[in-house]
Amino acid sequence: MSSLLMSYITATYQSKSDMIVAAEEWQKIIRRLAPQFKEKGATRQTVSQIWNKEGNFVLGNMWEYKDEKSFIDCQPLFREAEAEFEKETGIIHKLYPSRGIILHDVEF
């Protein structure tokens, strides 16, 4: 297993169009910063649309890191990405972060 720490952040938006635009713009920013995230120890990002809550517009962002140091080292990049996102979109959203140590990683 190459990842030891994960971060799961849900982002809630006011409308479906805000969610779609936000997802596209966020990925543009992350793709640009991807080499720096990799250098700092991020190993994977997965984005999902939470669809089991009718009428809500929520994205789930899972990030995986080599270790806790990698997570900490990536924080300035997240601040840079968030500032750019705010400047480019101005989309109102609420973030709900969770952090955890990966105990089991089962592939089927």
Image (tube, rainbow, N blue to C red):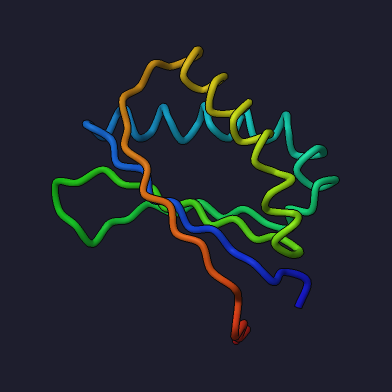
Q: Is residue 39 left or right of residue 77?
A: right
Q: Is residue 36 above or below residue 18?
A: below
Which residue of the protein is positioned furthest toward the top in this rendering? 87
Residue name at image x 62 percent, y 82 percent: 105
Which residue: 46% across, 19% down?
A: 86
Residue 3 place in picture, x, y as percent: 72, 69
Q: Is residue 66 left or right of residue 85?
A: right
Q: Position of residue 7 (x, y in %)?
A: 54, 58
Report the side of 31 relative to 36 (left or right).
Answer: left
> In which quadrant is the N terminus drawn?
bottom right
Q: Residue furthest right?
A: 39
The residue positioned 30% from the left and 28% from the top of the image is 17
Residue 105 lies, with reference to residue 8, above or below; the image says below
Q: Judge from the rendering whether residue 91 lies leftward or rightward of residue 56; answer left or right.
A: right
Which of the pair 22/79 is nearer the observer?
A: 79
Q: Is residue 13 above or below residue 97?
A: above
Q: Nearer the viewer, residue 55 or 90?
A: 90
Q: Residue furthest left?
A: 55
User: Residue 16's quadrant in the figure?
Assistant: top left
Task: Report x, y in % for residue 104.
Answer: 60, 85
Q: Residue at x 50, y 31 (%)?
A: 24
